[in-house]
Every structure is written in C-alpha cells, then in structure tokens.
Image: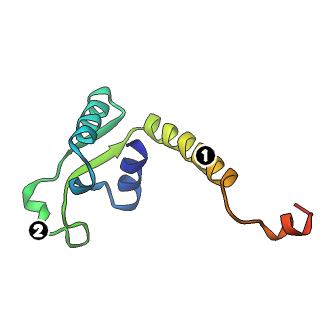
Amino acid sequence: MLLFLETRAVDHAGAVAGAHMNSEEFAMAKEMDAEGLIQFGRIASGSLSRMAIHKNCANWVRLSTMAFEIVADERRARAARGWKSRSYQTTAEKRGTG
C-alpha cells in the first residue's frame, strides 16, 4: 500500500484516484495518517474541476521522511526479487564475463 501511495506522491503530485483503492486500503491509509507516517485527505471540491490530468482523483497524499525510507527499502528488496526471477540473460552473462 505504501508503495502505491509513494508512486502517487512522486509521479502524480500527491493526487490519489480512489478507484484504485478498496475500503481496506482506505482504512490502511487513514491508519498510516493517524500514525504520522503519511498525510492523507480529500482534495477540496473546488479544485477537482481544474485537475484535468488527475481527473478521478479525489484524495491527496504526502509521505513523511520515515515513509520514504521504508519505501526505499521495499523497492530495493523488490528489485532484488525481480532480478532473481528474470527470464533473460545479460550479454555479459551469455559471454561468461559477468
């Protein structure tokens, strides 16, 4: 959940589309907000009509420093898992030099 919210914070200026979240995920976001890990809330209704590239986004998120650190660790672990399960060889591996 935190990885999704980090992506929204970084790549979408904090705008969150609720259609991509279920009720459990909303509850998790509210819990993380209460704990101070993130700030999560509703976008003011007057701003919604001006959000052409972020239409369908009615919520916003900001991550704390701690949340960014947690996400960085998880992304590193995810990258390592992906590297181990890849279905290709690098050219260096094929040549026996890497």
**Residue annotated with mark 2:** 49
Quadrant in which residue 13 is drawn: bottom left
**Whole-percent x and y of residue 43?**
16, 53
- Whichever of labels 1 and 2 marks the residue nearer the N terminus, that label is 2
Q: Position of residue 30 (x, y in %)?
A: 24, 35
Which secondary structure lies at badge 1?
A: helix
Dot 1 crowding, Cα within 10 Å, few <14, some 14–19, many 20+? few
Q: Is residue 38 above or below residue 42?
A: above
Side of 78 where 36 appears, left or right: left
How are the colours assigned in the image? rainbow
Q: Residue at x 78, y 67 (%)?
A: 90
Q: Which mark is residue 91?
A: none
Residue at horizontal 27 percent and vertical 30 percent from the top: 31
The quadrant the C terminus occupies is bottom right
Query: Horizontally, is 37 left or right of 74 in the view?
Result: left
Of 89 and 72, the residue lying toward us: 89
- Closest to the observer, 81 or 27: 81
Please, what is the three-letter code of the amino acid marked with disc 2? Ser
- Gap in angstroms between the C-alphas marked 1 and 2: 37 Å
- Image coordinates of residue 63 in percent, x first then y, are 37, 42
Viewed as shown, does residue 97 lie left or right of 5? right
Label 2: element kind: loop
Residue that carries the numbered disc 1 in the rendered image: 76
Position of 19 relative to 94 (above/below): above
Tell me which residue sits at (32%, 33%) in the image. Answer: 32
Amino acid under disc 1: Arg
Q: Is residue 11 left or right of residue 33?
A: right
